[in-house]
Amino acid sequence: MVRADLHIHTKYSPDACTSPKTVVDRLNAHPTIKAAAITDHNALEGFFKAKELAKAYPDIIIIPGVEITALEGEIIVLGAEELPPKPWNVRSTIDFARKRDALVVAPHPYRGYGLGALAKAYRIDAIETLNAITSPEANEAAENLAKEMNLPGVAGSDAHEPDELWSVYTEIQASFDVDAILKAIKKGLVRVSYTEKPMRF
């Protein structure tokens, strides 16, 4: 079983300030959450830096990810170590992910640049049903959308600064391996949860 925060931003997102080193250090220090997806806005530098730093710790895992600002709304790709070609729209981003056995997640569908009900028009793999900086009402609407689409729900802190890390997590019934984690998410072997109490450093 793996506990993962599947939506984290580093300083390589224009609206975030967390360094990749901070992500890795705090992941290493956390007693139970040992996996994280770096999902910077339209950028992979934060993932590559965190992945390199994480090599020093055999018990933590960094999942490749990116939050693409597509024409229709934001969409997360998990499992690809390259950016999709521009221009970015949802359909071409999904096609890109499919060719790489990557996973497509609709983040915070009812907040900000979320896809909302438009997600129903696409072959998405999972819905972010628990986003830590989204209102309970919007998360509930996302949960209902996931049920309607018969898709798994995942959780992400959407952390933009260090104190926001690990506020929620996804429990995944998988071995400690990126491919196994992604396959388990797609199969719906997941459960979302709030962290009992925030970690302070």
Image: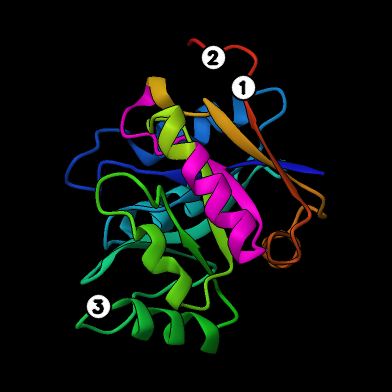
CB atoms at circles 3 and 2 under 8 Å apart?
Answer: no
Q: Which residues are magenta?
A: 140-162
Residue at x-position 25% and y-position 69%: 72
Query: Cα distance, mark 1 to mark 3?
Result: 34 Å
The answer to whether 109 appears left or right of 86 in the picture is right
- Rendered image quadrant of residue 117: bottom left
Residue 7 lies, with reference to residue 106, above or below; the image says above
Query: Cα distance, mark 2 to mark 1?
Result: 7 Å
The image position of residue 199, as x and y in percent, is 54, 14
Number of residues whose C-alpha sits closer than 10 Å to that of mark 3, classed few (under 14), some (14–19) or many (20 or more): some
Number of residues whose C-alpha sits closer than 10 Å to that of mark 2, classed few (under 14), some (14–19) or many (20 or more): few
Can you see residue 114? yes
The N terminus lies in which quarter of the figure?
top right
The answer to whether 1 appears left or right of 23 in the picture is right
The image position of residue 47, as x and y in percent, is 42, 55
* Residue type at tag 2: Pro
Residue at x-position 39% and y-position 41%: 20
The kind of secondary structure element at disc 3 is loop
Residue of label 3: 88
The answer to whether 73 appears left or right of 178 in the picture is left
The image position of residue 107, as x and y in percent, is 42, 53
> Which comes sooner in the sequence, label 3 or label 2?
3
Q: Is residue 149 magenta?
A: yes
Residue of label 2: 198
The kind of secondary structure element at disc 1 is loop
Number of residues whose C-alpha sits closer than 10 Å to that of mark 1, classed few (under 14), some (14–19) or many (20 or more): few
> Which comes sooner in the sequence, label 1 or label 3?
3
Residue of label 1: 195
Q: Is residue 54 magenta?
A: no
* Residue type at tag 1: Thr
Query: Cα distance, mark 3 to mark 2?
Result: 36 Å
